[in-house]
Structures are given as structure tokens and as C-alpha cells.
Amino acid sequence: MTIGKETKVGILALVTGAMLYLGFNYLKGSDVFSGMNEYYIKYQNVDGLVTSNAVMLNGLQVGKVQSIAIMPERNNELLVTVSINRKIQIGKGSSASLADNGFLGGKMINLYLINGVALKNGDTLISKTEIGISALIKEKTLPVMSNVDTLINKLKNIATKFDSTGVYINKLLKTSDKSIAALNSSVSGTIAENRENLKGITSNINTLSASLIETEKGIKPLMGKMSGVVDSLNALKLSEAVASTKKSLATLQNIMGDLQAGKGTIGKLMKNDSVYMHLNRTMADLDRLFINLKDDPKRYVHFSLFGKKDKKAKSDSLKK
């Protein structure tokens, strides 16, 4: 039997299409020749997930998104159907988390498996949503950007103030230049006007300096003589004081010698005990006299208002 050209072209196209399909799925990481199980996931928001997005397990693609359908009867929830390699044992309680697919954008689903009773084909996975890198960058970047905007506004205000300050500084510099020029001219005029007076003052200072030098030459010998006179006076006063001290010491030595020898009243008191004994006896007699006088004053003093004498006191005195 002869095969026609049309049949050959059809067979070639069919084989080419099958090879393209198998090659495309192989490049995407799908194992075409292995069986696939379908599972369902319910999300409130898929955030840009589309069909053919990858289903990943520990960084390896094990399936893909088959379809996304909206469910009006369940508050517009989204039902995502995924096909996963039949070799993957998915236990009850496993979850499917919606996540970003790197910095290039797009979405993918990450599987987080739990060991347990295996789910059957057509069961539902627990849905979760991860904070993607872009969302995290936005979350961290927005406060920084707001702070940067605030800082830029403050810098603008400061720059505006600096502009006005620069105007004032320029005016101040111009005024300072004028003031310095006027001061220079004034100083120059003053110096020119008083140049002769300055020359006279300088000449007088030079003359005064010369006079002071000559006076210093005359003062130096005079100061030397004064120093000699002062030294002589100091030596004279010192010698007089020494001589006077020697005389005083000699007189004191003579007095002490007389005292040691028993001369004079103080010497006798120091050397002779009899004087001391007599003085003691005299003092004792005086004490007894004063005591007797105090006890019997009528015996020694006679007094009468009528000029009569106490005869009894007189007779007592005569008896004694």
C-alpha cells in the first residue's frame, strides 16, 4: 500500500507537535511520563498567580498550576487547581503557600508537607500566603522613603535660608570693603598729617634713651658705694650688739657668783638657814597674836563712850 504525501505530512506534523509538547514540559521541569495528581487550594487573593506557574517543594518544581476559577457563591474566593507528581506523598495537614518567584516577579506555590495519612487525588490543601521579597522591600522601604522626603524638605528649607543668608553676607562684605577702604584712607591721612610730630617724638625718645644710659653709668658707682656704706653700718651695729651682750653676760656672771658666795640678802637667804628659821618663828608669833586679838580684842583695845576705863580689864591685865 502506498502512503500518500498528505498522510506523510500529517504524521510528521503530529510527531513534531508531540516532540514540542514533550520538550517544552521537560524544559519546565515536568515529568511527562509520570502520573500527576490534582489538588485544590482556596485563596482569598492569588496576587498575580496564573496558570502554568510552578509548584515547588524544597526548591524543586514538582508540579504546576492547572487552572484558577472564581467562586461567587463563596464570597468570590479563588479555587486554584494544581497538578503534582504522583510520587510526592502529601500527608493530611500539608499546606500550599503563595509566594514570590524571585526578584523578576511572578508567583509560585511552595509546598510544606506533613507526614501522616496521604491525601487522595482531588483533596484540598491548606492555603497560606508568604510575605514576598517585593512586599518586604516595600514594607521596609516606605518608612525610609518618607524619612528621606522629610529630610529633603528640611534640606530645601535650610538651603533657602542659606540663600537669604548669602545675600546678607554679600551685603556685609561690600559694607566691610567700604569701611576698610575708608579706614585705610583715614589712617593714611592721619599718618601723613602727623608725620612731623612722629619724627619729633621719635627724636625726643632717642634723646631720652641716651640720657638714661648716661644716668645709669653714673648711678652704678653710686650704688656700689651705697652698698659699702650699708655693709659698714650693718657690721658696726652688729659689733655694738655683741659688745653689749658680752657686758650683760659678765654682769650676770658676777651676780650669780655673789649669790653662790652668800653675799647680799638673796645670797644669805640661799646659804644661811638661820634667817629662814627666824622668819618662820616671827610669822608664827604674828599668827598667834592675830588669833588672840581676834578672840579677845578688849585685852588690847580699850574704848568707852564716857571716857571711863574698864577697871576689870585693867586688873586682869595686871594680874597676868
Image (cartoon, rainbow, N blue to C red):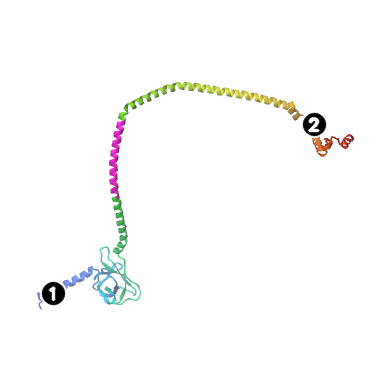
| Whether residue 103 is situated above or below residue 238 in the rendered picture | below
Residue at the extreme bottom: 1
Element carrying mark 1: helix
Dividing the picture into quadrants, the one containing residue 42 is bottom left
Q: Which of 221 and 42 is in front in this view?
A: 221
Dividing the picture into quadrants, the one containing residue 62 is bottom left
Foreground disc of the pair 2, 1: 2
Q: Where residue 137 sits: x, y (%)?
A: 30, 62
Question: In the rendering, which numbered label is found on residue 220?
Answer: none
Which residue does the image show at 67% across and 24% down from the upper left? 251
Residues drawn in magenta: 161-190
In the rendered view, does 307 fall on the left or right side of 265? right
Which residue does the image show at 31% across and 31% down from the upper left? 190
Q: Which of 103 and 264 is in front in this view?
A: 264
Which residue does the image show at 13% across and 74% down from the upper left? 10
Q: Where residue 226 sits: x, y (%)?
A: 50, 22
Q: Which of 47 and 122 is in front in this view?
A: 47
Q: Where residue 35 sits: x, y (%)?
A: 26, 75
Q: Which of 157 and 310 is in front in this view?
A: 310
Q: What's under tag 2, amino acid-wise? A: His
Q: Which class describes the residues within 10 Å of circle 1: few (<14), some (14-19), or many (20+)? A: few
Residue at the extreme front: 306
Q: Is residue 262 visible?
A: no
Q: Is residue 21 visible?
A: yes
Taken as a whole, is the magenta stretch helix, strand or loop?
A: helix
| Whether residue 284 is situated above or below residue 263 in the rendered picture | below
Q: Where residue 214 sits: x, y (%)?
A: 42, 21
Magenta region includes residue 211: no
Residue labelled with disc 2: 278
Residue labelled with disc 1: 10
